[in-house]
Amino acid sequence: MKNYEINEGTLAIISVSDHQSKVVENEEEYLVDKSAYEIMDESCRYFGSSYEGRVVGARAMLDANYKLPIIVEESRRLIFFPTESPSLEGCMWISLQHFDTVSKDPKNALIYFKNGKKIETHISSYSLKNQFLRATLLESILNQRKNH
């Protein structure tokens, strides 16, 4: 597959190489001939911004500088958080909306989604929980600003 836009059914974008990613959706999985960064950037652009623009916004909202969650599209709650630095080849982008929990394995945690799917990682459960909390904080700040 050449192109892919993140949508409400997207659970995760998993970097396979510099030029290929695995997209996990509720019902299907695809190999896309683009990096996870390219999918994130093109999806942000599809919804009217860019990856860099979303990073600048998240940085300002969270007062943080690294491993920032991204609001791909606000009205559909398309918020994704990286499992590690987005510049690293093994980075996964996880949907906040679909994330359920993470196993307690200190080194290779499993990510569980609300629909029962799971993804194995090489990231600690502690790090994944921190990323989830950061994304939740971003969503909370966004909701507060919408309501005021």
Image (tube, grey):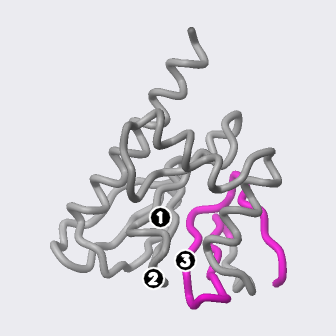
**Left or right of residue 120, residue 74 in this image:** right
Q: Nearer the viewer, residue 145 or 64?
A: 64
Q: Which residue is mark 1?
A: 116
Residue that label 3 marks: 14
Cα distance, mark 1 to mark 2?
23 Å
- Tell me how many marks there are: 3
Task: Mark 1 or mark 2: name the one nearer the start of the chain.
Answer: 2
Mark 1 or 2: the one toward you: 2
Q: Residue at x 65, y 67 (%)?
A: 25
Amino acid type of the residue that numbered disc 3 sits on in the rendered structure? Ile
Q: Secondary structure at mark 2?
A: loop
Query: In the image, is residue 34 part of the stretch drawn in magenta?
Result: no
Cα gap from disc 3 to disc 2, whole angstroms? 7 Å
Q: Residue type at mark 2?
A: Gly
Q: Which mark is residue 90?
A: 2
Q: Which residues are magenta?
A: 1-27
x and y, in percent, of residue 11 in the image:
58, 62
